[in-house]
Amino acid sequence: MATSESSGVAERYASALFDLAREQNALDSVEADVSTLRQMIAESDDLRRLLESPIIKAEDQIRALGAVLEANGISGLVANFAKLAAKNRRLFALPGMLKVFGELMAKHRGETLAIVTSAEPLTDAQLETLRQVLSEKTGGTMKLETIVDPSLIGGLIVRLGSQMIDTSVRTRLQGLRQAMKEAA
């Protein structure tokens, strides 16, 4: 599937979820469930395989996804939204849909969204320091969305719009590995 096509799908679905949540005065609860689901996807290889597999029947995806969502306390609009994406064979785009929803929420609040991926959960003090530094650089209010990815080993990856700052140990090791291959 072409990137622009899946991006368009993500934007349409996320906009629909945002509009529905706003109509039902449920933006905050939907945002919390979206954040939980994004974290679950980031942390679970099995869940990502479920979302990405074109060979799993839609009914089986819906059933499995429903069980996972229920077990993690996600219900209502977000659960129905994810099941609709499965029914329409659009689960491959669910991570993008959830990301776009976060961007819509940040825009709604007049914030700039920064997605911060770290090897371990950041403390409140670290998050506040990062928020202040990014606010100074952008000149606006920052909303931080955090994702924990132990494979980074250490450091951070900060995504701010189309910019990415990667100070992770994993990326540094990959760079060293590539340099050693080229030198040999």
Image (cartoon, rainbow, N blue to C red):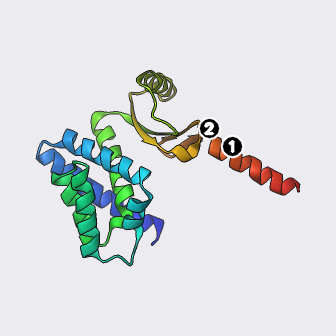
Q: Is residue 105 above or below residue 43?
A: above
Marked residue nearer the N-terminal end (2 or 1): 2
Work out which quarter of the rendered image holds the C terminus and state it.
bottom right
> Which amino acid, by three-letter code, is at mark 2?
Thr
Work out which quarter of the rendered image holds the N terminus and state it.
bottom left
Q: Residue furthest left?
A: 24
Position of residue 127 in the picture relative to residue 64 (left or right): right
Q: Is residue 19 above or below residue 117?
A: below
Q: Secondary structure at mark 2?
A: loop
Q: Is residue 80 above or below residue 28?
A: below
Around disc 2, counting alpha carbons within 10 Å, would you say few (fewer than 14), some (14 to 19), or many (20 or more)? Answer: some
Q: Give x and y (percent) for residue 103.
A: 35, 44
Give yes or no for contact between labels 2 and 1 (Cβ–Cβ under 8 Å): yes
Q: Residue at x 29, y 41 (%)?
A: 105
Residue holding disc 2: 167
Q: Residue at x 52, y 44 (%)?
A: 150
Q: Residue furthest right?
A: 184
Q: Which mark is residue 172?
A: 1
Q: Give x and y (percent) for residue 70.
A: 21, 54
Residue 7 visible (yes or no)? no
| Res. 84 image quadrant | bottom left
Q: Secondary structure at mark 1?
A: helix
For the residue pair 126 and 135, the one nearer the viewer reads as 126
| Res. 80 image quadrant | bottom left
Q: Give x and y (percent) for residue 156.
A: 55, 37
Position of residue 106 in the picture relative to residue 156 (left or right): left
How many numbered badges does the structure rendering display? 2
> Which amino acid, by three-letter code, is at mark 1?
Arg
Position of residue 181 in the picture relative to residue 73 (left or right): right
Q: Residue at x 27, y 39 (%)?
A: 108
**Label 2 to label 1, Cα distance in Å?**
7 Å
Position of residue 135 in the picture relative to residue 173 (left or right): left
